[in-house]
Amino acid sequence: MTQQITIRPTTGADTPAIDALLAVAYPALLKADYPPSVLVTALPLISRAQPGLLRSGTYYMAENEAGHALSAGGWTLSGPQGGVGPRDLGHVRHVVTHPEAVRKGLAGAILSHVFDQARANGVRRLSCQSTRTAVPFYQAMGFEVLGEIEVMLRPGIGFPAVQMGRRI
């Protein structure tokens, strides 16, 4: 039996569902690529929904017919650490998939939706701060590695990541 999946924009009311998705997904999926010393400080900070992002109209959730969040992700004109660059540059934001739903096309469907929506809003290039774990996924979606970076989550707490980009 095929499960019906819906992709829709999130709202502030989706905060508990996205928090739960992030709390389950990141510890399970990132542990192979990050040492415990990084995860112990980073997970409490990255495994939380960002209310402004959920209300932005450009963050989406893939949910099953029971309303369970299986994957999420979106884009903004503002960068992950704030600030707005050129109007044709968008930023992929907080893409996540439940560990039991990986490799089923959900994140790819969300990212394809992101490409369409961003393009419709004049964006021609997308930037992405990828986890080490997600680099192969983003490469399969047409992104190129631009270099390794450290995302400052809080003063003194950095998270190793990979800067990626692609034209849309």
Image (spheres, helix red, strand yellow):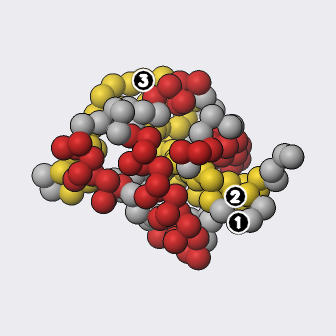
Residue receiving disc 1: 67
Query: In front of the other: label 3 or label 1?
Result: 1
Q: Do the residues labelled 2 and 1 touch (CB within 8 Å)?
A: yes
Residue occupying the point 59% across, 45% down: 100
Up-down relation of residue 124 to residue 11 (above or below): above
Viewer-closest of 50 and 98: 98
Q: Where is residue 164 in the image (x, y as percent from the top left)?
A: 44, 30
Query: In front of the other: label 2 or label 3?
Result: 2
Residue occupying the point 42% across, 45% down: 28
User: Which numbered disc, 3 or 1, marks the residue that appears first in the sequence?
Assistant: 1
Residue occupying the point 46% across, 29% down: 135
User: Which numbered disc, 2 or 3, marks the residue that appears first in the sequence?
Assistant: 2
Q: Which mark is on residue 145?
A: 3
Q: Which amino acid does label 1 sit on?
A: Gly
Q: Are marks 3 and 1 in contact (CB under 8 Å)?
A: no
Residue with the most extreme right position: 1
Q: Which mark is on residue 63?
A: 2
In screen coordinates, is 50 left or right of 2? left
Residue density around tag 2, few if under 14, some if 14–19, many if 20 or more, within 10 Å: some
Q: Which amino acid does label 3 sit on?
A: Val
